[in-house]
Image (spheres, grey):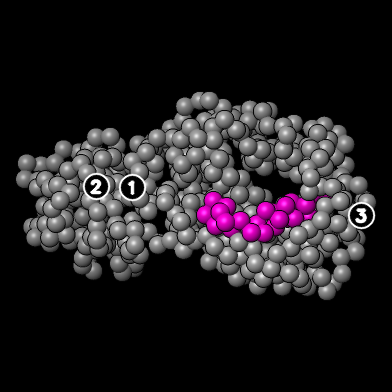
Amino acid sequence: MNQPFTHPGMLHTQQDLAFIKAHAHREPWQTAYQTLCEQPFSSLDYKPEPHTHVIRGPYGKPSIGDKELSSSANAAYSHALQWIVTGDKQHAQKAIEIINAWSYVVWNFQLNDAKLLAAWTGDYFCNAAEILRYTDSGWEEKDITQFERMMRTVYYSLLENFFPEANGNWDGAIINMLLCIGIFCDDHHIFNRAINHYLRGRGNGGITKYIYPTGQCQESTRDQSHTQLGLNEFALACQVAWNQGVDLYKTADNRLALGFEHAAQYMLGEDVAVYGIISEQGRERIWDIYETAFQHFHYVKGLDMPYCERAIEKTRGSEKSWLALTMYQGAIEKPPTAREAPTPSIQALRAGAQTEPTAQPPDHAITITPDEDLQAILDASTEGAWIVLSKGLYTLSETLKIPNNLTLSGQGLETVLFLDPEKTGPALTNAHDDLNNFTLRDLVIEGALKVNHHVIPTVRAGRTRMRVPAVVGVLFLPPNMPIKCTVSTLNM
């Protein structure tokens, strides 16, 4: 994108803000607005407690200033919205007070969850700031400049390289945040980096890495709270980009819609297609996340979204549900042609290693066990060799180098290749520049920090620090060479 940014233009355009103001006292928006106003951070008595150094460790331990930061971000956004609805400048001044308090004090974020915390809070601050800046709020120019300085030096400097080594909800939140920074700062470089990462991010960072062609999410086997968290962040990022004329929603044939429907279907108690064992943890709570995707895919694009619609019926009016106020607008003036619900790829339903191998090895195949030297056996193999790995865990102390004219197969899900998690290279690479006639099938390449047969290999189990090793499954080098090989029934 190179055209000038629309302002305001993050989650809300000028037309969106006008809609919120006009509908805040009608249902279902009124209940959502009242719910927002009832939150402790929505009171005019709210007092920010800024910290210079904000510290959040793994899963919130230790916690120094992070709760205060999160509360203030929510408060700033809430008062900015109340300013729009009521026209009462007390709310505008309260939002300005909160933003200024942190802009002049916070210096950095520390420990494991620093990037996640910055992403969670920065988008609320940015959306509040965008509203204040482009309405008659009274926010002074010197304070606007200081806020931009905070966004660039404290937030962007931490988030600019994303964090695709973590579970995908991290990069979903970071993408959303960087889009907002780019818009507020009128910085196309930042904005376009976020767009590119959404489309092509490595690790768990991009949309097609987070949501598979079946609709299953990268975190579905982890728990449903993180799955819904990640989906929400990717949806908010899509809406921010949409308001700037960039349609990320449509990526990979509406892959985001498929992910939302898959999650909603499971949360509503139904069975879904899944690789691995889908987690029951967090299934008891349907989060207030479905409004954004349903509004766009159903009302704007015309897709049938039956499970999202049912999920919304269960969340509207709940204790902390206010997304209807900001995202729901109902039918548009010129409804699109009705389209069927998104469907999973038939091929993807059997993607990944199965319980049993899908091919019968030839009589000349060599079968080995986990205690043998796999690299030495590959190096000594003759042209056309078929190496069968028995069931078990093959821990690789170094990257496995693959020769030409070879088939490497396993016994299905219980054959696992696992690179030492302290290593940063790929699990597999080519032994020669002219790699050709190589088939890899019927096994799992574990991408987490520890092996867990019940979750998909890219779930980052065991993460205890912000900078974890970058795990790559298969990397054939050099990248520009024409490779003639087959990758079949592979999980990474």
> At 81% across and 47% down in the image, what residue appears?
42
Q: What crowding class fits label 1: few (fewer than 14 Cα within 10 Å), some (14-19), or many (20 or more)?
A: many
> At 46% across and 35% down in the image, what residue appears?
279
Is 472 positioned to the left or the right of 239 in the image? left
Residue 316 visible (yes or no): no
Pick whichever, 400 or 403, lies toward us: 400
Can you tell which mark lies on residue 90?
3
Pick whichever, 397 or 492, lies toward us: 397
- Residues at marks 1 and 3 touching, judged by CB atoms closer than 8 Å: no
Can you tell which mark lies on residue 393?
2
Up/down of 441 relative to 171, above or below: above
- Residues at marks 3 and 2 touching, judged by CB atoms closer than 8 Å: no
Quick check: is 64 in the magenta stretch? yes
Residue type at tag 3: Gln
Give the structural element (helix, strand or loop) at label 1.
loop
Q: Which residues are magenta?
A: 56-79
Is 426 positioned to the left or the right of 281 in the image? left
Q: In the rendered structure, which disc, 2 or 1, sits on the residue that comes first in sequence? A: 2
Residue type at tag 2: Leu
Quick check: is 44 in the magenta stretch? no
> At 14% across and 56% down in the image, what residue appears?
373
Q: What crowding class fits label 3: few (fewer than 14 Cα within 10 Å), some (14-19), or many (20 or more)?
A: some
Up/down of 491 relative to 284, above or below: below
Q: Which residue is mark 1?
A: 451
